[in-house]
Amino acid sequence: MSHSTSNASNFIRNIIIEDLKSGKHDTIVTRFPPEPNGYLHIGHAKSIVLNFELADEFNGKTNLRFDDTNPLKEDQEYVDAIKEDVKWLGYDWDGLFFASDYFEIMYEKAVLLIKKGLAYVDDLSADEIREYRGTLTEPGKESPYRNRSVEENLDLFERMRNGEFKNGEKVLRAKIDMSSPNINMRDPVIYRIAHATHHNTGDKWCIYPMYAFAHPLEDAIEGVTHSICTLEFEDQRPFYNWVIENCETESKPQQYEFARLNLTNTVMSKRKLKLLVDEGFVDGWDDPRMPTISGIRRKGYTPEAIRAFCRETGVSKSAGVVDTQMLEHFVREDLKLKAPRTMGVIKPLKVVITNYPEGQVEMLDAEINPENPEMGIRKIPFSREIYIEQDDFMENPPKKYFRLFPGNEVRLKHAYFIKCEEVIKDEEGNVIELRCTYDPETKSGTGFTGRKVKGTIHWVEATNALPAEFRLFEPLILDDQEEAAEGEEKSFLDQVNPNSLEIAQGFVEPNMKDAKPHDKFQFFRHGYFNVDPKLTTKDKLVFNRIVSLKSSFKL
């Protein structure tokens, strides 16, 4: 699928241009390689857009590849969800691959390293390996098993494959340099034992390659030319190159790193997002408060807005934090010409217009979208009884309050002027109804030029109104602090906003009866809303607020 990229210059694009010009590559091949251990989030969207659109621009190819080397955490559910997300964002992959498709080749490459004296079977425990590895300031110590013979290592590795040892009893390590300043080069583990059923290969294997070993081999097998990843993998690049060189791959991919996307009030760790799901802070991976692609899709974000946002954030080597308002800006820009306008009352207050004829219902005209006149006109019923917002009335208003209060007159959007004559309260003193009068000379669209009013409020006709639920969201994460460090779940969970969801019961115009899941509307004054695909039933509409109408954000 072709996409209109900005073609903005960035260092990876410049590298590709140079590689094509020099003849280093004839065809560009990129890949998007998620691990199927969770749902994709907005950070992944940036990687998807970058990989697919760079290849697309240069008539290359992009593979979707699942890095499924850890059967303990991976599941077919995540595989299916990732495919759906990539397609929803608007991309078609050229090849669909699984790391597990290459397990036999990876095993053969590990055997090759053993034969070259570059890998050995180690009996140290995970804790001991960590202890022997050293620190950033101290070199590591060699394992007592490091100098086993090639024959012994080949025998032990084959027995590992045959299932003769328990989980954690042995590992295969690359033999590189225990005094390297880069800890990733201090004999990293490349195979571990895991007696677990794999979603793709079943029980065929009980040893699995580590990601850092598998990834460069996958790239080489698929003929990937530019392996684009985020900055946290920069320290892994020397090992990536070591694997490519010493495993004697025919293809020689190269790794390039860019700064990952970080958003204010947003957690981007799949492990922490899973914790929110598992602990019940949200109602699933697709909760509209989640930064997952399935969550923001359910909230009502559009793929066009996400793609435009990802392009605008650019590609660089320097990490930074992007204001979430920037993403919301692109959502508004995309929806303002597409979304029909309508009126919804979120917290209803009943109004009876005492001088309007009883039993009469008239149909008023309103543009479906004033910014896009081609969308036409909609009909709105009006009668003696309407609902307005509770917030649009104050019994004792402050100065410069221009909405409804006793004795004041306002315009009803698309309708007439009304004046508040009487306030009805319950036994507790709560306002439960207003009695108003209307002026039939002030009908919208008739060119009325008499007196002016400063306030315009929205409303819904009461007898035909459809009940609706409105779900209003605040950031799920309370502040803009950096994410809690790995292993600090408690401090991270303390950042969760207990008021991130407000549910209100109100009414919408009757023409909304045909609204379908994922239909999007602009509710006058309230913002843009999406029909929730999971909670909406034939008897009740549920709307998720996508974004408010306005923001102070400027590009």
Image: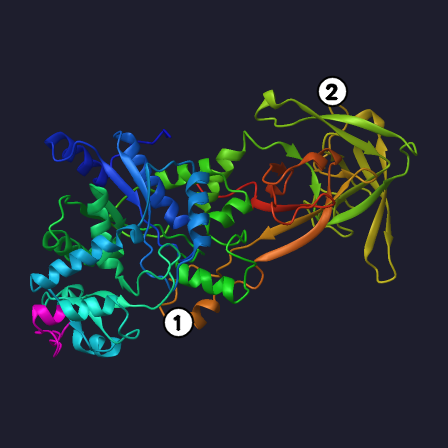
Q: Which mark is residue 488?
A: 1
Q: Nearer the viewer, residue 45 or 319?
A: 45
Instruction: Say if residue 301 shows up in the picture.
Output: yes
Q: Residue 56 is drawn in which quadrant?
A: top left
Q: Which residue is mark 2?
A: 447
Instruction: Verify whether residue 390 appears in magenta.
Output: no
184 left or right, relative to 83: left
Q: Nearer the viewer, residue 458 or 41?
A: 41
Q: How many marks do you count on the picture?
A: 2
Q: Nearer the viewer, mark 2 or mark 1?
A: 1
Q: Locate the C terminus and report the quarter of the image it occupies.
A: top left
Residue at 26% over, 55% down: 103
At x 14%, y 45%, the residue is 252
Residue type pointed to by label 2: Gly
The image shows residue 182, relative to residue 473, as above or below, that is below
The residue at the point 73 percent across, 50 percent down is 397
48 left or right, relative to 253: right
Tell me which label, 2 or 1, sits earlier in the chain. 2
